[in-house]
Image (cartoon, rainbow, N blue to C red):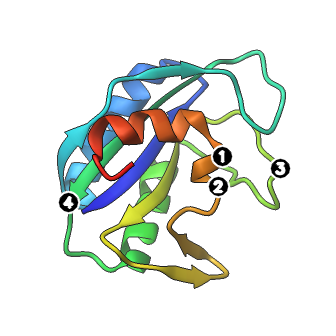
Amino acid sequence: MLFLSLGSNIGNRERALERATQLINMLIGTVVRRSSFYYTAPWGFFSKNEFVNACVGVETSLTPHRVLDAIQLIEHIMGRTEKSVNRLYHDRVIDIDILLYDDLHVDEPDLKIPHPLMLERDFVMKPLREICNDF
């Protein structure tokens, strides 16, 4: 099972997470689990805009790199124009991160699974625990 983290802090944040979930169903695989929405302060940068976060569990046959490509396409479709680089974060209409993919471990410059910062982020771990009994 693939677990993804979703976040938004611009515009209609709940609608953005719903739309992202629909696009994940279309482009990545079947969403079989979805957490509640969690309302959180920005992490790693200052913004007056609160985030809405959630996690989804997805059944997919895509490779990790194909999942990454699909995530980047979804973010682009939804209007995200900048990616965070070197931990410089900013407001965003949608952010989708790969947290876990079965028991895979990937450590490449453009892809790291499990997500290296997920244990430091309550806004990731709380919704993940809601849908994944392993945490």
Q: Which residue is mark 3?
A: 88
Q: Nearer the viewer, residue 122 or 69?
A: 122
State if disc 1 and disc 2 touch (CB < 8 Å). yes
The three-letter amino acid code for the residue at tag 2 is: Leu
Gap in angstroms between the C-alphas marked 1 and 4: 27 Å
Sequence order check, earlier mark of 4 and 2: 4
According to the picture, the residue beneath numbered tag 1 turns out to be: 120
| Front residue of 72 and 134 | 134
Instruction: Please name the residue shown 41% across and 62% down the image.
Output: 100
Farthest front residue? 134
Q: Earlier in the sequence, mark 2 or mark 3?
A: 3
Could you give the CA–CA distance between mark 3 and mark 1, rounded to whole angstroms? 16 Å
The part of the image, by quadrant, that contains residue 122 is: top right
Helix, strand or loop at label 4? It is loop
Judge whether residue 100 can be spotted in this image: yes
Say which of 103 and 61 sits in front.
103
- Which residue corresponds to mark 4? 29
Rendered image quadrant of residue 71: bottom left
Task: Name the amino acid, label 1.
Answer: Glu
Q: Which residue is depicted at the point 40% across and 23% down?
A: 37
Separation of marks 2 and 3 at Cα, in angstroms:
14 Å
Mark 2 = which residue?
A: 117
Residue 72's disc is none
Judge by depth and name the residue closer to the eye, 74 or 126: 126
